[in-house]
Structure formats: structure tokens, C-alpha cells
Image (tube, rainbow, N blue to C red):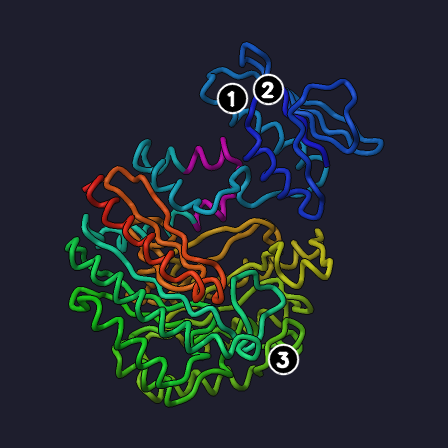
């Protein structure tokens, strides 16, 4: 699909919106004016006076043009995207649940609009300007209400800590994160952890010198529980020795794969002060687990959950993914129903996203209209079932190439929301990140965000550690400039 841009440079939203309707197509942006338009194409045009937006779609024997008068130059991009949306919707027969919205943070947008124009007008604009469906507007409104209560806990001097453990037992077929299997990277684990401890200690010294207040700690991956119980205990101890934990409201570790969970590891985490863990089955269908490259069974998931309860964890999250290969509506419904019966404190429902670097995408798997419809039914069922069982949506975000152009939503019981998830997704305050692939996000009082990137892969992290540590000096520079 060629997208021709004539008289404007609104390429980002135009391309992303086009991808929601044609997720399998290669899209090429063409900026040069030409009379030789190569099919299939989407020709987008705004006249010199910025008074008319015009869009033409030409695919095989189909060709249609629509236009819209631009009454306010500030709405030029919006009016153009409205034309693109309406034309592609008519051609494909697809109704996008989030309408024109292609960004990661629709809840943040809704909150900002609500603050500027009020709740009812924000809902009206979501519907009439952005073409968001009534069910997603309702979901956005409810989620924003719970998010706001968490955001209000953050202070001017607040920050959260993220620690990356980029190792997994195996790599799942849908995964695009920087992680390596333990078998491949076993020799890297010890030197990696030794340097990670140093980075954490260095970051702690910077925090102390700046007088920042720790709100949450999140150890993610990868799968942190690929570490032994001794390694986990040492990592937790380094964090506790490097930071003032007296203000920390939440300490999460992604236990992740049920096949990496042992009683020793659970006790090490609990004794270390970890108060929230995730045990992530993704599905309770054993055939689907095998298809996506998971080595555990649904029975192991249940055993791990019961073991965590026995050890003493009273804040457990469990993840599911709607739309996995070979998953049917009935098998997904069964997974939701069984998780609800287990009664974890929170359940996160993700939608399958076909990331470029995942094995699934590499195998040539496509996104089809039928898959999208089944996935929509899965997500709709999860919303209904979770609300009926006293779970509420507390955070929500979106990714590119999601089946059905849907969303990922965290659901929790009352007072069991994950604070870190909200802070990172809203970009509420500074996130200081340690480990391979981690990105620190420094936030100023006027909402300016500056990023500090760690090296992506464990071998880079090890080989260029001193260079990376030098970058940490930018944290102090940032706070001296903005605070």
C-alpha cells in the first residue's frame, strides 16, 4: 500500500491508522508529488489554503474519493484522518473499536480532555470526533477514575525503580522483548548480576544525593524467577541496601513462568519484602501453551498459584492473552472462568500483538478479519465476566498490530491495583531503570521527559558497563536543570 502525502506532513497518524485496517500490508510513504500513482494507494491531500482535506483510495477495481471542509486550521490533521478512517472503514467493512485513536495511552488523552472540557464533552468528542465505540468510551471513563486515585499518590519528588532480568526458560513465539533463554545465556548470568548490583548501588547513591522519594519497585524481564532463590535474595538485599524503602508503597516481581517457581524462591521474595507477584499462564489450554513455546502445563500454573498462597502471598496477578494461535473463544472463556474461580487479586487481559521481531511474525502469520472478530468476542467476554466478579479496570494501554485493534487492560479487586503499572503507563513521575534493555525516563515538573538508554543485550551490558554507568550522571544534570 502506497500512501501519498500531498500538501501536508501528517504521516505518523495517517500511516498508523492505515495499518489498523491493513495490518499485513507493507506500507510505503511517498512525499513527492507525482501524476503516476502506483496501486494500491491511499492519496491524501490538503490544499494550500488548508480549507479542504481530500482522500482517495484505489485498490484493484475499487476507487473512491471523499473530502471534508476544514473549518479550523488547527483541525486539519483531525479532518484528514476522519476522511481516511471513513473511507477505509467503508472499503474493508471493519469498525475500529478505538476509532481514529492509534496511540498507546487513550486513558491519558481522555483524562487530559476531561480536565480541559469536562467529562461529558470529552465523551462526546471521543465519539463524534474520534469515532470511539460506546463500549470503549465507557471502559476509558471507568479506568480513568481508578487511575486518577493512584496518580494522586505521586509527589513532586517521587520516582519508581525498574530492574530488568532479561532471561527466560524459553522464548515465547509472540514475544518481542529483549530476553535470552537460560540455556543460551547461562554463562552471562553471573557476570550480569554482579554488574547489575553495581548499577543499582550507583543509582541509589544518585537518588540519595537528590533526596528523591521511592514509590514503587518492579523487577521484570524476561523472567526474574529464572534466578535461583539465592540470587533473588541477593538482588532484593542490594535494592533494600541502596534505597530508602520506608516510603515504598509496592514491591513487585514478575514470577512469570509457573515452571520457574519454587517454594524456596517464593519464600526468598516474601522474606525480602516483595508484596506483589505475577504468575502468568497466558492461557490454561495446554495445546495452546505448546504452540506458543511454553514448557509448563495449566496444572503447573494452578500448583504454583496454590504454592504462592500457602507461602503467604496475598497480592497475585495473573496474565492472559486473547487471540493466541489455536485458541478458540470457548477455550479462552474457560481460561477466564477458571482464573476468576482461583480469585487472584488482579487479572491482566492482553490482546495478541504481532510484533515485528516475534517468531510468530517471522513465521509469516497474518492477522485476518475472522481472527479479529473472535478476539473481540474474547475481550468482550473478559470485560463482562471480570466486572461481574468484582474486578475493576485500573490501567489500559494499546500496542501496534493488535488483533482487532483492541487493548491491554489490568483488572483488580478493590485496593489491589498495581501502582507501578499506572505510573509507567501514565508517565506520572521519573522511572529509574537498571539492567540490560532498561530505559530510565526522567520527568520534569512541566512534563518534559528525557530518556537514558541502557545497552540492549546482556553481552553489551557486560562489555560496555562503565560507559553505561557514565550515562547515569545525566540524572543529576536533569534534576539540576529542572528542579
Query: Of callouts 1 and 2, which one flags the residue occurring earlier in the amino acid sequence?
Result: 2
Instruction: Check the image and report above or below for 461 versus 211.
Output: below
> What residue is drawn where x is 37% and y is 50%?
452
Predominant SS of the magenta segment: helix
- Indicate which disc residue 53 carries: 2
| CA distance separating discs 1 and 2 | 7 Å
Magenta stretch: give its range: 123-139
Say if residue 420 shows up in the picture. yes
Q: Secondary structure at mark 3?
A: helix
> What residue is drawn where x is 60% and y is 50%?
401
- Foreground pick, 395 / 6: 6
Residue matched to label 3: 286
- Foreground pick, 392 / 160: 160
In the picture, measured across the screen, residue 109 lies left or right of residue 99, that is left
Residue 473 at x, y percent in the picture: 27, 51
> What residue is drawn where x is 45% and y is 72%?
318
Query: Of callouts 3 and 2, which one flags the residue occurring earlier in the amino acid sequence?
Result: 2
Asked where in the image residue 64 lies, by quadrant, the reply is: top right
Asked where in the image residue 463 lies, by quadrant, the reply is: bottom left
Residue matched to label 1: 76
Amino acid at each position: 500500500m502506497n500512501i501519498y502525502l500531498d500538501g501536508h506532513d501528517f504521516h505518523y497518524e495517517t500511516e498508523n491508522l492505515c495499518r489498523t485496517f491493513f495490518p499485513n500490508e507493507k506500507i510505503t510513504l511517498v512525499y513527492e508529488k507525482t501524476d503516476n500513482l502506483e496501486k494500491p494507494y491511499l492519496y491524501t491531500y490538503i490544499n494550500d489554503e488548508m480549507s479542504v482535506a481530500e482522500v482517495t483510495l484505489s485498490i484493484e477495481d475499487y476507487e473512491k474519493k471523499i473530502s471534508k471542509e476544514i473549518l479550523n486550521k488547527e483541525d486539519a490533521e483531525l479532518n484528514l484522518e476522519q476522511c481516511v478512517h471513513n473511507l477505509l472503514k467503508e472499503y474493508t467493512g471493519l469498525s475500529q473499536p478505538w476509532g481514529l485513536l492509534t496511540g498507546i495511552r487513550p486513558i491519558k488523552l481522555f483524562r487530559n480532555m476531561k480536565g480541559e472540557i469536562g467529562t461529558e464533552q470529552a465523551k462526546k468528542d471521543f465519539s463524534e470526533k474520534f469515532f470511539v465505540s460506546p463500549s470503549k468510551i465507557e471502559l476509558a471513563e471507568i479506568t480513568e477514575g481508578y487511575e486518577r486515585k493512584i496518580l494522586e499518590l505521586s509527589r513532586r519528588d517521587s520516582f519508581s525503580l525498574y530492574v530488568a532480568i532479561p532471561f527466560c526458560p524459553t522464548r515465547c513465539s509472540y514475544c518481542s522483548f529483549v530476553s535470552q533463554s537460560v540455556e543460551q545465556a547461562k554463562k552471562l548470568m553471573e557476570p550480569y548480576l554482579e554488574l547489575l548490583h553495581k548499577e543499582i548501588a550507583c543509582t541509589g547513591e544518585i537518588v540519595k544525593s537528590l533526596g528523591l522519594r521511592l514509590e514503587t519497585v518492579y523487577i521484570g524481564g524476561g523472567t526474574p524467577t529464572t534466578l535461583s532463590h539465592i540470587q533473588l535474595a541477593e538482588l532484593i538485599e542490594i535494592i533494600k541496601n541502596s534505597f530508602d524503602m520506608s516510603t515504598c508503597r509496592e514491591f513487585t516481581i514478575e514470577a512469570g513462568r509457573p515452571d520457574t517457581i519454587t517454594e524456596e524462591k517464593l519464600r526468598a521474595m516474601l522474606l525480602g519484602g516483595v508484596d506483589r507477584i505475577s504468575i502468568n499462564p497466558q492461557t490454561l489450554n495446554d495445546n495452546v501453551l505448546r504452540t506458543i513455546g511454553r514448557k509448563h502445563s495449566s496444572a503447573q500454573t494452578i500448583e504454583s498459584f496454590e504454592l504462592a498462597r500457602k507461602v503467604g502471598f496475598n497480592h497475585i496477578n495473573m496474565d492472559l492473552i486473547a487471540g493466541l494461535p489455536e485458541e478458540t473463544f470457548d477455550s479462552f472463556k474457560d481460561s477466564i472462568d477458571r482464573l476468576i474461580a482461583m480469585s487472584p487479586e488482579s487479572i491482566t487481559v492482553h490482546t495478541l500483538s504481532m510484533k515485528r521481531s516475534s517468531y510468530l511474525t517471522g513465521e509469516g502469520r497474518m492477522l485476518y478479519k475472522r481472527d479479529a472478530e473472535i478476539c473481540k468476542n474474547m475481550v468482550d467476554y473478559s470485560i463482562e465476566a471480570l466486572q461481574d466478579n468484582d474486578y475493576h479496570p485500573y490501567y489500559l494501554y494499546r500496542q501496534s498490530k493488535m488483533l482487532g485493534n483492541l487493548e491491554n487492560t489490568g483488572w483488580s479487586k478493590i485496593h489491589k491495583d498495581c501502582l507501578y503499572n499506572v505510573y509507567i503507563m501514565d508517565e506520572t513521575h521519573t522511572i529509574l531503570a537498571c539492567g540490560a534493555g532498561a530505559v530510565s525516563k526522567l520527568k520534569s515538573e512541566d512534563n518534559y521527559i528525557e530518556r537514558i538508554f541502557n545497552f540492549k543485550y546482556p553481552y553489551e551490558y557486560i562489555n560496555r558497563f562503565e560507559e553505561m554507568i557514565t550515562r547515569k550522571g545525566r540524572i543529576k544534570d536533569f534534576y539540576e536543570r529542572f528542579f
